[in-house]
Amino acid sequence: MSIESIVKEFQAVAASPARQLDNYKAAGKKVIGVLPYYAPEELVYAAGMVPMGIWGSNTKTISKAKEYCATFYCTIAQLALEMLLDGTMDKLDGVITPTICDTLRPMSQNIRVSMKKLNKMPTIFLAHPQNRKPAYGLKFCIDQYTNVKTALEEISGAPITDEALKEAIKVYNASRAARREFVKLAGEHCGVITPTLRSAVLKAAWFMLKDEYTAKLNELNAELKALPVCDWKGTKVVTSGIICDNPTLLKIFEDNHIAIAADDVAHESRSFRVDVPENDDPMMALALQFAAQDYDVLLYDEHSSSNRRGEYVANLVKESGAQGLVLFMQQFCDPEEMEYPYLKKALDAAGVPHIKLGVDQQMRDFGQASTAIQAFADVLEMAK
């Protein structure tokens, strides 16, 4: 298949997760919704069910969720609940609600209460440890994952065996490797893989069974590797933030000849940066993977006296060959707002130009963002 036809398949999935849900249900599969982030999807896969990411929506309007949410909740959380309330996700057989930030913690209870009140799907609560590396943190993580495992077994009607979980880990590690390769190839072939297409390919992973997705992505990677490296005449940036998947916003990058060399985005590379160890204890392996997650604004850093995350992001820009960084700052995201001075300090110290764009999923007017991106492109071009 051609690059264009493969990418179109990913675009179709990314644009219509509800249709993808319908397809899996029509095939007789059970589907579990998974809110952001760091949820052990391998458990869902090992149970013979389909994990489906829920990261809000760029097209819906918040209405029903206002009954449960404070106005200062981020739109990702509000729109996730909106889709669970308005019927969009009614075919789900359950939903996992991680509580990785101060908004997702109360949101998990809003979802639990609303789903029970409306007699919809079971809600599976997941609390990750912040002290995730010590032995007691690993034990807490395993206990939490075991609770998730038990709930999934009740929904599927069958036990999740160690053998099935080990196989799921292999499938997911292969998928993570393929996505890391795609990110690298996309940066080398940015004349072919535009920011909009790059986003669609990575976004589709949240709505497909990982073996199906990886097989298709490996086809795309093989086609990209056969091309000569692009002699890109524009500029390149690294993107950072929770999510930046709005096609209208990403099109502004393309209009200003800006390519994405790499990313530090939770919805994208952060989700597949770390593999799960393939050892004899798969539950411990999943806990060890979470313990190994690092350089994330939402995770506790025991080396808090240093600016490791800021330095990591600055180094990512330099190592990727980008000229600058674009930070997509979610409105009402306190952790990102509190971290920004430290990130800015590290970027300034490394001589990395950057801009900060305030975004949310209810944005419909991109005039200010367009002006800021155009001006940033001019600055980067002059500095080349």
Image (cartoon, rainbow, N blue to C red):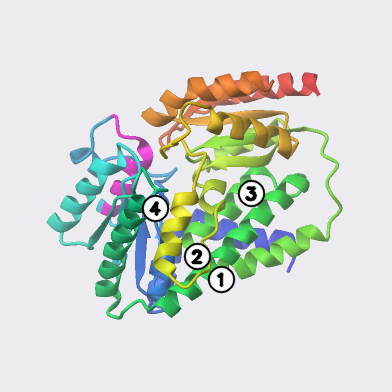
For the point 30% across and 34% down, the residue is 73
Q: Please indicate whether residue 268 sits to the left or right of residue 382 in the image.
A: left
Distance of label 2 from label 3 (alpha carbons): 16 Å
Q: Earlier in the sequence, mark 4 or mark 1?
A: 4
User: For numbered disc 2, what is the local secondary structure?
Assistant: loop
Distance of label 4 from label 1 (alpha carbons): 19 Å
Tell me the kind of residue under disc 4.
Ile
Q: Which residue is mark 4?
A: 54
**Magenta stretch contains residue 148:** no
Tell me the kind of residue under disc 3.
Arg
- From the top left corner, tell me how far across and down residue 293 is, in percent: 49, 48
What secondary structure prevails in the magenta region? helix
Whether the residues at callouts 1 and 2 have beta carbons within 8 Å, the answer is yes
Q: Earlier in the sequence, mark 3 or mark 4?
A: 4
- From the top left corner, tell me how far across and down residue 97 is, in percent: 30, 53
User: For numbered disc 4, what is the local secondary structure?
Assistant: loop
- From the top left corner, tell me how far across and down residue 294 is, in percent: 50, 43
